[in-house]
């Protein structure tokens, strides 16, 4: 039951509402009315009445929204995801849905874990189990992000007193050494893909170090043949939504730094102009069968259909295997670009801008092991500076 009164503090009137929390502890809620103490007591009492009514409704709503003590953690996660769906990008929602339904919920369902009883140890054991089963570090981190966000919401709504995931020691990431092609290997690749449906996408990725989503999202309207520039600002990626794999086209990139304008390299300009002519010829030849949904996209097939993310990845693997080339992933073409830039004296900071990394540390963590030229330069400078001389003994 609520109790309330008006009190004076430093010359102003305040409403004071006394209530019991969920643990039966009596608490007081102070709020200023903004009214001076002289002659405003009745106005303050009217404000108090309104505030008590509103606060009582708030407490009732919170109590009705609060899950019972036996709610399963998995059910809470599903409810939370439905609640935040409208605030998430479709690709983010799809990823969250997949991890919750296919990975997190089955594990905690089996253990009959409830929201109120889940502990830091329980969550840590889940991560350790996933890693033991071969789940990649990046995926485990994504699981952690989801669980922590959901439990933050549970704390905010007073479902639980504190977030057990906040005390988790996240798994240590093993440093990833990226595979890459050198200059000769890339040139060999370019030879075997001549005329291939994925030729343009592969070459653009290798030259500019583009992400798969970026090269597939490249549009003719983003290429300025007059100013000789190419703008990365649109992406095409995949996600799984309600069990169905869908392709998402969006005018956003992975991060703000990924939106970048790059110079149009002469040989790429020539390749793109030739590609544009080929697309126009295919459109005339196919007539009504030509797909008109992707006319502004660079990476389409002979019927104008946009190349799909999975197709690009899988087709690249087939090319590598068929031509007995060194095995690398499609994404490793991006690493190949960075390694060639490093080998030719381009700084890590410049590579960060070229690749569109949001943080310099990302670039340094991935590619610093390749920066051997800078180490040789440092060795030479320290040798010149210190000039250590050792006396020869016995004429030796």
Image (spheres, rainbow, N blue to C red):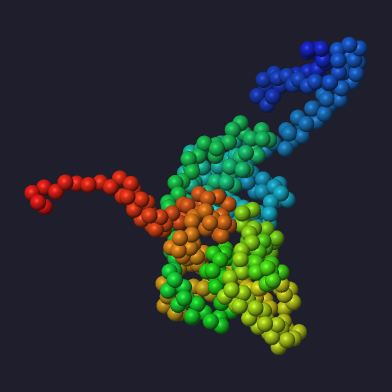
* Relative side of 353 to 65, left or right: left
Identify the residue at horizontal 67%, vertical 61% (top origin). 233
Q: Is residue 213 above or below residue 191?
A: above
* Relative side of 126 to 222, left or right: left
The percent position of residue 181, horizontal first and vertical second, equals 44, 69
The percent position of residue 390, horizontal first and vertical second, equals 19, 46
Residue furthest bottom in the image: 285
Q: Is residue 159 visible?
A: no
The percent position of residue 239, horizontal first and vertical second, equals 63, 61
Residue furthest left in the image: 394
Is 187 in front, or is 394? Answer: 394
Identify the residue at horizontal 58%, vertical 42% (top origin). 148
Identify the residue at horizontal 69%, vertical 24% (top origin). 21
Q: Is residue 388 visible?
A: yes
Is 368 in front, or is 396? Answer: 396
Split into 4 quadrants, where in the image is the N terminus?
Answer: top right
* Relative side of 348 to 95, left or right: left
Q: Is residue 247 above or below residue 290?
A: above
Identify the residue at horizontal 68%, vertical 26% (top origin). 22
Question: Which quarter of the picture shows residue 287?
Answer: bottom right
Q: Is residue 277 above or below residue 341?
A: below
């Amino acid at each position: 039951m609520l109790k309330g009164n008006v009190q004076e503090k430093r010359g102003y009137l305040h409403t004071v509402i006394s209530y019991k929390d969920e643990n039966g502890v009596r608490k007081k809620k102070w709020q200023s009315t903004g009214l001076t103490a002289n002659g405003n007591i009745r106005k303050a009492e009217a404000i108090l009445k309104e505030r008590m009514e509103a606060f009582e409704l708030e407490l009732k709503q919170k109590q009705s929204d609060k899950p019972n003590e036996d709610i399963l953690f998995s059910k809470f996660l599903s409810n939370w995801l439905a609640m935040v769906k409208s605030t998430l990008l479709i690709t983010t929602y799809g990823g969250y849905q997949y991890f919750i339904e296919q990975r997190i919920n089955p594990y905690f369902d089996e253990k009959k874990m409830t929201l109120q009883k889940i502990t830091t140890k329980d969550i840590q054991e889940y991560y350790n189990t996933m890693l033991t089963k071969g789940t990649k570090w990046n995926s485990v981190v994504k699981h952690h992000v989801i669980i922590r966000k959901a439990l933050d919401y549970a704390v905010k709504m007073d479902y639980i007193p504190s977030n057990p995931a906040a005390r988790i020691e996240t798994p240590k990431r093993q440093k990833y050494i990226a595979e890459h092609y050198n200059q000769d290997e890339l040139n060999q690749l370019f030879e075997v893909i001549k005329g291939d449906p994925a030729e343009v996408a592969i070459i653009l990725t290798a030259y500019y170090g583009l992400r798969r989503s970026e090269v597939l999202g490249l549009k003719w309207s983003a290429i300025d043949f007059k100013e000789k520039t190419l703008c990365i600002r649109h992406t095409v990626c995949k996600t799984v939504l309600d069990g169905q794999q869908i392709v998402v086209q969006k005018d956003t990139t992975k991060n703000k730094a990924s939106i970048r304008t790059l110079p149009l390299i002469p040989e790429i300009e020539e390749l793109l102009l030739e590609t544009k002519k080929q697309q126009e010829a295919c459109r005339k030849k196919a007539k009504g069968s030509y797909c008109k949904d992707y006319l502004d996209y660079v990476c389409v097939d002979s019927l104008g259909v946009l190349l799909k993310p999975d197709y690009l990845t899988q087709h690249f693997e087939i090319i590598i295997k068929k031509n007995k080339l060194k095995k690398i992933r499609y994404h490793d073409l991006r690493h190949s670009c960075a390694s060639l830039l490093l080998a030719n004296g381009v700084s890590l900071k410049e590579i960060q801008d070229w690749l569109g990394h949001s943080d310099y540390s990302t670039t340094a963590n991935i590619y610093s092991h390749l920066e051997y030229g800078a180490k040789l330069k440092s060795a030479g400078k320290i040798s010149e500076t210190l000039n250590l001389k050792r006396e020869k003994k016995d004429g030796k």
